[in-house]
Image: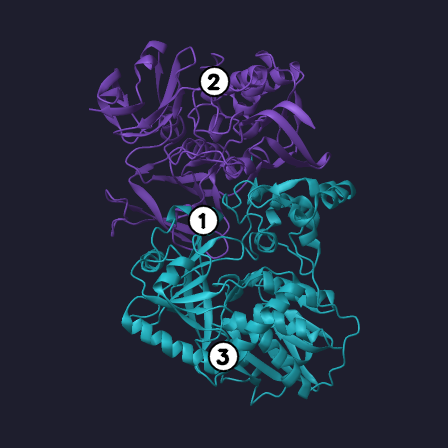
Chain colours: A purple, B cyan
């Protein structure tokens, strides 16, 4: 079969991209979703706090998803659920499989990658100990609790203070489990401030900063963990061990964009974001292939995912309607105290402002964000505080973009 | 009453069981864990050794070389992943080079074909990521790799298809002598009767022999820890890399697995029980030593670490013989490295030499040496895939996205021989949950499918048996 735009993934990114692509004039759009339901991981995020920016009110994950699901269905956009994409080629042929359709191919004029991200696993951290039952990534535990209505454990220690870990600390507590500790190897949490307050402080759950799990115990099921303080090099300090009896360990140690399809298609990836290299239209190195949402960069809020995905949807539609654009791209790069900048390229030939997204590597107070093109300062913005847990943005007006010569480096200094 | 009962569902017991079913014998395997391949056979290097390591004249040397020859045949019949990738023993100084010449001579004496000492130029051509300090290597073209738990599961499954029995959760507690054999009594009160027993209990072979009244089997254990890297690192090395053994000890291996991962390890620590805890020191040792073999190891791609206990005997050679004290008990013990490689050859010997003394071996007319792969779906052509999905839509539902495993394959693995009854059992047969997300996405679904197919509640589904339940109750 052939379609104008094929969107891989019906989480918040895919849904928002589909709506915007439709509203930008392309009607022949299909969304491929591997789960039986639309909405992606939002379906298991039953807490509220979603949509404050996008809708001006606090929604639960499923409510936020439903708004977009309704918009997709109102537009009559074709959706295939329980459909897994097995491969994508550089000439935009998609191989997919589902129980009802079997194995099938779609030739697309444009493709939007919206596969989201996955959680880093315990193994990535090389934490010593046994490999018993009771070790889960926070999102897996969330699925058991919120979708299956079953408890993966009762006495819990959490490693990592990412947002899912914080949310699960509260959720498990509310469901009658005891959360003994949240350990965070960094001197700061990687989660949102509001989650620290509402999920830990309000429930008297201790957060141990500069701590990590140094041993997991238990043969069949987890029986306990040891956490230790770490030095500046993240090495455990001998003599600081604390033992906790528990039956469950949750890991919330980071999210990784799911770019296996992207990589196999030959799209250039950014080592820092682990997502595709894109310009401000969210077009990747393969012409007509766009990426948005957490598959591109891990966002703090779903509201930003929707915002970014609308960009990809709009430009994918323009690509289908107007064909390939000639580009005059300049490269953006991360300088001092910045871990990445997205987009990684700006096409100077396009009109309009460009919103830059970036993350800092450490907490800085009273600092200045600078954009440098060679020796030239393109912009300088003062900030009271920046933290690694929260994404920073800067809007670059068209006249500033004109000033960029060769490339732009974003730095943050005291 | 069985003619032969094999104790231990590791690779040695598995290969013996399979070989027994070639003949008209009533046979059964008992395993103390909830699944087969739960000891050393699930956590080792997966190397099919060429055979230059063992001293000439030892059982190790004999069965290694013979096993190396048999392995591709077994792997093909059983549809187990095997690769003849060749191995390299890398030298980093002149003294090492001398050792390589000794190893080569030893290997030739053992009957290893094709051994060759290669220059560093050739070495870097073969393996560009080897440390630049390397000065040469011994190249063994017959070296290979195999999936150790895949071989174990497939050999037992094939034996069961050919009529063998399997009893899991059967830990031998005591043995009664009967007029024509033995009664084995398990810790949970089950009994099995056998005319002849093969003790292939791995680390527990000494304890099992003692239960029969033979106290001469002395087994020790050595823990080996490993670090596994994601398949994203595929191609970092393509051959199995050993360090030249020296006074400084043995280094660690850097090698590919048959699935395309990179494996680093093992360490070697004396242990006094079967505790497979990984340690900070062990994992650090692997990293330090691996860095002396290769440059730029993509350690950021680590997806898991694990350890296994390797059993060895006080003879420091394999024990493969009928007990001198207990007639009808055959001990196959102390099968340390190169045990995996040797297993098919050991099985041939045990059955055709040792068992043949007790039974007249008549051919099993219905014997088939073949077994279909557990994860077969993605290997089919498009047309066959669609025919199958039409017949059974479960084959169109991908459950494990990282390894592309369908619900149909999981259901099949739960019901075919040997049945997968735990989450780890599904994982070892299909790789579902072994990929980069390590089961983060698919584990809840696999748990659900197991509960449905085994007609159990979610709280009864275990990760790997006994008390390893994943769910403890309901939400409020």
The quarter of the picture where residue A207 lies is top left
At horizontal 24% and vertical 26% (from top left) the residue drawn is A364
- Chain of the residue where label 3 is placed in the rendered structure: B
Q: Which mark is residue B60?
A: 3
Alpha carbon distance from label 1 to label 2: 34 Å
The quarter of the picture where residue B10 lies is bottom right
Helix or strand or loop: what does disc 3 sit on? helix
Quadrant (top left/top right/bottom left/bottom right) for the C terminus of chain B = top right
Binning the other alpha carbons within 10 Å of mark 1 as few (below 14), some (14 to 19) or many (20 upward) gives some
Whether residue B455 appears in this view of the structure is: no
Sequence-first disc among 3 and 1: 3
Is B354 left or right of B309, judged from the image as shown?
Answer: right
The answer to whether tags 3 and 1 share a subunit is yes
Helix or strand or loop: what does disc 1 sit on? helix
Circle 1 sits on which residue?
B233
- Chain of the residue where label 2 is placed in the rendered structure: A
Q: Which mark is residue A307?
A: 2
Asked if the residue at tag 1 contacts the one at tag 3, i.e. Cβ–Cβ closer than 8 Å, the answer is: no
Asked if the residue at tag 3 contacts the one at tag 2, i.e. Cβ–Cβ closer than 8 Å, the answer is: no
- Chain of the residue where label 1 is placed in the rendered structure: B
Helix or strand or loop: what does disc 2 sit on? helix
Q: Is residue A319 above or below residue B474?
A: above
* Nearer to us in this view, A51 or B228: B228
At horizontal 77% and vertical 43% (from top left) the residue drawn is B387
Whether residue A372 appears in this view of the structure is: yes
Quadrant (top left/top right/bottom left/bottom right) for the N terminus of chain B = bottom right
* Nearer to us in this view, A278 or B216: A278
Single out the mark in the foreground, 1 or 2: 1
Q: Which mark is residue A11?
A: none
Binning the other alpha carbons within 10 Å of mark 3 as few (below 14), some (14 to 19) or many (20 upward) gives many
């Amino acid at each position: 079969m052939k379609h104008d735009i094929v969107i891989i993934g019906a989480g918040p990114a895919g849904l928002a991209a589909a709506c915007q692509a439709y509203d930008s004039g392309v009607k022949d759009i299909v969304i491929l979703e591997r789960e039986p339901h639309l909405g992606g991981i939002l379906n298991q995020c039953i807490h509220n706090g979603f949509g404050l920016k996008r809708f001006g009110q606090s929604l639960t994950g499923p409510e936020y998803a439903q708004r977009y699901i309704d918009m997709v269905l109102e537009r009559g956009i074709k959706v295939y659920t329980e459909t897994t994409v097995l491969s994508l080629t550089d000439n935009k042929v998609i191989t997919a499989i589902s129980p009802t359709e079997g194995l099938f191919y779609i030739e697309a004029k444009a493709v939007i990658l919206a596969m989201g991200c996955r959680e880093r696993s315990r193994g990535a951290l090389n934490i010593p100990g046994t490999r018993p039952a009771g070790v889960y990534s926070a999102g897996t535990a969330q699925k058991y609790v919120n979708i299956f209505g079953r408890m993966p454990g009762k006495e819990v220690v959490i490693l990592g203070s990412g947002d899912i870990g914080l949310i699960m600390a509260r959720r498990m507590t509310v469901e009658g489990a005891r959360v003994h500790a949240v350990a965070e190897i960094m001197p700061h949490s990687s989660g949102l401030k509001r989650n620290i307050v509402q999920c830990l402080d309000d429930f008297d759950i201790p957060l141990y900063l500069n701590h990590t799990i140094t041993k997991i115990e238990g043969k069949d099921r987890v029986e306990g963990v040891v956490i230790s303080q770490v030095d500046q090099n993240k090495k455990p300090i001998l003599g600081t061990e604390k033992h906790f009896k528990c039956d469950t360990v949750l890991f919330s140690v980071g999210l990784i964009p799911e770019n296996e399809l992207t990589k196999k298609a030959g799209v250039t990836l950014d080592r820092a974001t682990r997502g595709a290299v894109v310009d401000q239209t969210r077009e990747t190195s393969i012409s007509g292939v766009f990426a948005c949402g957490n598959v591109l960069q891990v966002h703090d809020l779903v509201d930003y995912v929707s915002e970014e995905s609308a960009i990809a949807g709009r430009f994918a539609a323009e690509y289908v309607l107007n064909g390939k654009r000639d580009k005059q791209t300049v490269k953006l790069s991360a300088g001092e105290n910045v871990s990445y900048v997205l987009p990684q390229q700006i096409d100077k030939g396009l009109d309009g402002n460009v919103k830059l997204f970036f993350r800092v590597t450490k907490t800085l107070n009273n600092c200045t964000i600078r954009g440098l093109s060679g020796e030239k300062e393109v912009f300088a913005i003062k900030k009271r505080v920046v933290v690694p847990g929260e994404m920073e943005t800067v809007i670059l007006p068209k006249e500033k973009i004109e000033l960029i010569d060769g490339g732009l480096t974003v730095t943050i200094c005291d | 009453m069985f003619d032969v009962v094999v104790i231990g569902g590791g690779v040695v017991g598995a290969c013996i069981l399979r070989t027994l079913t070639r003949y008209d014998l009533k046979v059964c395997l008992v395993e103390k864990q909830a699944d087969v391949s739960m000891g050393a056979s699930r956590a080792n290097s997966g190397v099919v050794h060429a055979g230059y390591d063992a001293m000439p004249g030892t059982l190790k040397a004999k069965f290694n070389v013979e096993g190396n020859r048999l392995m591709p045949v077994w792997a093909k019949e059983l549809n187990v992943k095997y690769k003849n990738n060749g191995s390299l023993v890398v030298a980093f100084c002149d003294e090492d080079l001398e050792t390589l010449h000794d190893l080569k001579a030893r290997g030739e004496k053992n009957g290893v074909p094709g051994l060759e000492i290669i220059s560093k130029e050739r070495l870097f051509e073969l393996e560009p990521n080897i440390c630049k300090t390397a000065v040469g290597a011994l190249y063994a073209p017959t070296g290979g790799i195999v999936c150790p738990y895949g071989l174990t599961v497939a050999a037992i499954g094939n034996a069961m298809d050919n009529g063998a029995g399997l009893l899991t959760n059967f830990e031998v507690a005591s043995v009664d002598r009967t007029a024509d054999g033995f009664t084995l009594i398990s810790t949970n009160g089950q009994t099995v009767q056998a005319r002849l027993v093969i003790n292939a209990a791995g680390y527990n072979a000494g304890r099992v022999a003692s239960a029969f009244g033979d106290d001469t089997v002395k087994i020790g254990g050595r823990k080996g820890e490993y670090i596994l890297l994601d398949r994203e690192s595929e191609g970092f090395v393509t051959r199995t890399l050993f360090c030249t053994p020296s006074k400084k000890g043995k280094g660690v291996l850097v090698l590919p697995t048959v699935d395309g991962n990179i494996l680093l390890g093992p360490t070697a620590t004396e242990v006094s029980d079967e505790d497979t805890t990984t340690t900070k020191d062990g994992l650090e040792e692997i990293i330090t030593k691996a860095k002396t073999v290769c440059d730029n190891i993509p350690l950021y791609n680590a997806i898991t670490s694990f350890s296994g206990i390797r059993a060895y005997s006080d003879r420091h050679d394999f024990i493969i013989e009928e007990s001198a004290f207990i007639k009808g008990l055959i001990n196959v013990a102390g099968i340390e490295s190169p045990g995996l490689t040797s297993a098919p050859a050991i099985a041939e010997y045990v059955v055709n030499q040792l068992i043949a003394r007790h039974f007249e071996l008549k051919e099993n007319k219905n014997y088939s040496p073949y077994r279909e792969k557990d994860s077969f779906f993605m290997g089919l052509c498009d047309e066959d895939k669609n025919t199958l999905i039409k017949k059974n839509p479960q084959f169109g539902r991908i459950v494990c996205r990282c390894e592309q495993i369908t619900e149909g394959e999981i259901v099949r693995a739960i019901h075919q021989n040997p049945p997968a009854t735990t989450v780890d059992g599904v994982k070892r047969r299909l790789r579902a949950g072994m990929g980069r997300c390590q089961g983060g996405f698919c584990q809840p679904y696999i748990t659900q499918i197991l509960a449905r197919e085994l007609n159990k509640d979610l709280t009864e589904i275990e990760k790997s048996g006994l008390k390893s339940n994943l769910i403890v109750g309901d939400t409020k």
